[in-house]
């Protein structure tokens, strides 16, 4: 059985197969606007869930709100993680709750495994940081909207 099939089962929670060789996932990107690293382990009990999700994003853009310039990512921010065939995707979200202005941080990671190495995933990340005077106010200003390359690796 391929590592890709094992990882797919873990991320989709659709397979009862144990995570034989895979213990964690690691993603990284660095460009003129953002530098980030993301890491998560797989649950030891069932090998299906991502646990101890963490990471850091440094937004270099001077327009970025102070709350998100050096953001430490945690498990509560990971809203979705899934694998569909060769695709690995992560959705990360956080906001400033009841602060004024109300600011949001949305990061989507969309990658595809490489034919040469099925444990390596290349793709893009999309980062959107928005701000509004009130939580439900529209329109929102978008001081940071950025898309660039990212890679992830199953180790």
Image (cartoon, rainbow, N blue to C red):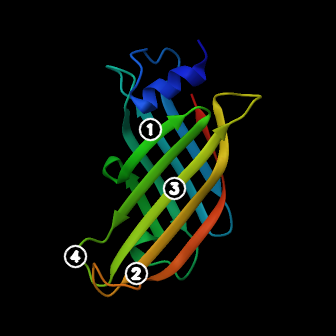
Between the C-alphas of marks 4 and 1, the distance is: 29 Å
Between the C-alphas of marks 3 and 1, the distance is: 16 Å
Ranked by sequence position, the earlier of labels 2 and 3 is 3
Residue under the point 42% across and 67% down? 105
Between the C-alphas of marks 2 and 3, the distance is: 18 Å
Mark 3 or mark 4: which is in front?
3
Mark 1 or mark 2: which is in front?
2
Figure quadrant of the C terminus: top right
Q: Which residue is mark 1?
A: 40
Q: Which residue is mark 4?
A: 98
Ranked by sequence position, the earlier of labels 1 and 2 is 1
**Residue 131, label in figure:** 2
- Whole-percent x and y of residue 26? 55, 39
| Label 4 packing within 10 angstroms: few (<14), some (14-19), many (20+) | few
Between the C-alphas of marks 1 and 2, the distance is: 29 Å
Mark 4 or mark 1: which is in front?
4
Disc 4, disc 1: CB below 8 Å?
A: no
- Whole-percent x and y of residue 23? 48, 25
């Amino acid at each position: 059985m391929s590592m890709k099939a094992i990882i797919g089962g873990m991320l989709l929670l659709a397979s009862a197969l144990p995570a034989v060789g895979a213990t964690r996932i690691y993603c990284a990107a660095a460009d003129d606007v953002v530098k980030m690293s993301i890491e998560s382990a797989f649950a030891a009990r069932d090998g299906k869930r991502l646990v101890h999700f963490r990471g850091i994003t440094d937004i270099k853009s001077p327009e970025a709100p102070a709350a998100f310039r050096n953001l430490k990512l945690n498990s509560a921010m990971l809203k979705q993680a899934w694998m569909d065939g060769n695709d690995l995707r992560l959705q990360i979200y956080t906001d400033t709750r009841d602060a004024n202005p109300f600011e949001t941080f949305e990061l989507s990671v969309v990658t595809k495994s490489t034919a040469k190495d099925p444990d390596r995933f290349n793709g893009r990340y999309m980062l959107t940081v928005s701000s509004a005077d009130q939580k439900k106010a529209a329109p929102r200003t978008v001081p940071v909207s950025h898309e660039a390359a990212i890679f992830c690796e199953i180790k």
